[in-house]
Each structure stands twice: as structure tokens, then as C-alpha cells.
Amino acid sequence: MASSTRQALAAAKEAISPLLGKADLLFAEELFTIGAAIASSIQLRNLLSDPSGEEKSKQGALAAVFGKAISKDALTFANKLSGLRWSKGSDLVSAFEQMGVYVVASIASRDKTLAELEDQLFAARSVVDSSQELQQALSSRQASVESKVELVSALFKGKLSAASALLVRFAVIGSRQHKLSEVLEGFGKQVSAVADRLVATVTVAAPLSAAQQKRLESALSASYGTELNLNVEIDPSILGGVKVQVSGEIIDGSVAARLNQAKLQLA
């Protein structure tokens, strides 16, 4: 990430902080909607992300496109973001998405439902990862974004909280150049960051009992010196044991890994 975008993101988070106390999911949805609109229009994206562009021109464009369709707070914040210096247009789009996730996570933290949000995002990603047919449908270039949103909404109807459903819906809309599961994983990491927790993805050959999962979570939290959110995946191919990944670091205690290591040593 370029330094200009990094600085702009820091400024964006600082600008949105005063709004979090009264923010609701509609405000988060507005931020996602603005980002999606900018992503779909190269002309608007270039105008708003041009560092040499006049502030009045950018504000006029935002007012013309969104008018009274969004709240005053959302429009004011959009004006703020367009006035920051971004390395490229896609960074501005990403900023609206990140701020949308940040608002949803902050609301969940305020409502004490952050753990539920983390768990449901992980569950949704697991469902997507487990279905090749679903992945093909979501990656089809012939299908419209609207039809993909309808498909995923129907799949998870009644299974997600309003906050989780909102993030899943806009993950579908935002998965233009990435797999939906990758976007959901990114959203999950952002949510965990609000909780100031690392995410540990644990892969085991067979399901863990609640007691086993609790002991593993406690051991990892003690090892890393901070609370971790544990996501458990089942993969019979690891032949027993457990594989843990925390922020890119892999701790592999599976039989398969030890066998492969032995083969390498014997080769």
C-alpha cells in the first residue's frame, strides 16, 4: 500500500470516529453504496481520486450523483474522502468498503454482538468454500451482480443477523476481481481488528469438542499474548493432528506434515 493511501485511510478513520456514536446500519450501507457506484464508473472514479482535481468539482459530482438519496452525514463523509490523496482510484473504492465494514463492526461492538458477527462471516465463507457449484455461479461473467446478490441472499435467508447479511451482500457486490470467500475473509479480519483480536484458523481432521476448542483457544491466546478469535475448519486429508494459522504464521502439527517433512529429509 502506497504511503499516500495509508495516510488517507488513517485520516478517513479519524474523520468517521465522531460519527460512530450515532451510526446505524443504514449509514454503513450508504458508504458501501457510494463505493460501489464509484467502482462502476471510471469517469467518476478518476474525477474523485484525482489529486489535482478541484474540491468544488468533486463535491458537485457527488451531489449530482447521489443528491438526496443519501444522508447528510454520508455525503459529508464522501466529500471528505474524495478530498484526500489516494494513490489510485481503486484505493478510494476500497476505502469506502473498509469504512463500511468499520462502521458495521463498531455498531456490533457497541451492541455486544461482535463475536456473533465474526462467527457468521466465517460460517458464510465456509459455505461458499464448500460448494464448487456456488463458486462457479458467483464467478460467472454472464450472471448479473443483482442475480448473484439474490442467490446469496436466498441461501443465507434467516441464518444471518442484519449486520452479517449486510456485509455478505456487499461482499458479493465488491467481489469484482476477487473470489467471494477472499472478500469475506478480508471483511472478517477487519471486524476482528476492531475487536483487537488476532484470527486463528485451525484445521483439524475431525471436529473438536467445545472443551477442546476452548482449551486450544486459551493456549493460543496465552502464546500470542492477546485474545484470539478461533475459526475451525475440517480437513480429513491432514491425517490427524492440527494445523494453526495466525496472521500468516503456520503452526503445523499434523501427521501429513510430519510425513512430508520426513520424506524431504530422506530425499
Image: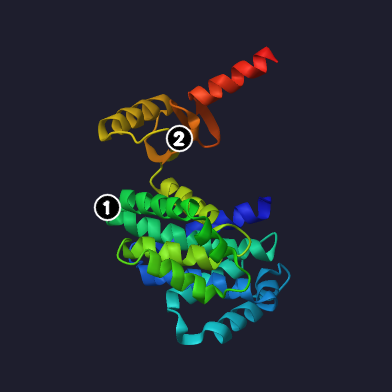
Q: What residue is drawn where x is 60% and y is 70%?
A: 82
Q: Is residue 225 left or right of residue 159?
A: right
Q: From mark 1 to mark 2, how far is it between C-alphas? A: 35 Å
User: Which residue is found at the position 43% from the left and 70% from the top?
Assistant: 29
Q: Amino acid at mark 2?
A: Pro
Front residue of this view, candidates 209 and 247: 209
Looking at this view, is 35 or 245 the one in front?
245
Q: In the current view of this chain or complex, which residue is farthest to the right?
A: 52
Seen from the viewer's position, the closer of residues 17 and 113 is 113
Q: Is residue 216 above or below residue 88?
A: above
Quadrant of the rendered image containing residue 141: bottom right
Q: Which residue is mark 1?
A: 112
Q: Quick check: 137 left or right of 28?
A: right
Q: Which mark is residue 216?
A: none
Give the secondary structure at mark 2.
helix
In the image, 254 versus 168, the foreground residue is 254
Which label's residue is closer to the chain start, 1 or 2?
A: 1
Residue type pointed to by label 1 = Lys
Q: Residue 259: x, y in percent?
A: 56, 20
110 up-or-down from 234: above or below: below
**Residue at x-position 49% and y-position 22%:** 255
Identified at 28% across, 33% down, the residue is: 209
Is there CB contact under 8 Å for labels 1 and 2?
no
Quadrant assignment, res 37:
bottom right
Residue on which disc 2 sits:
236
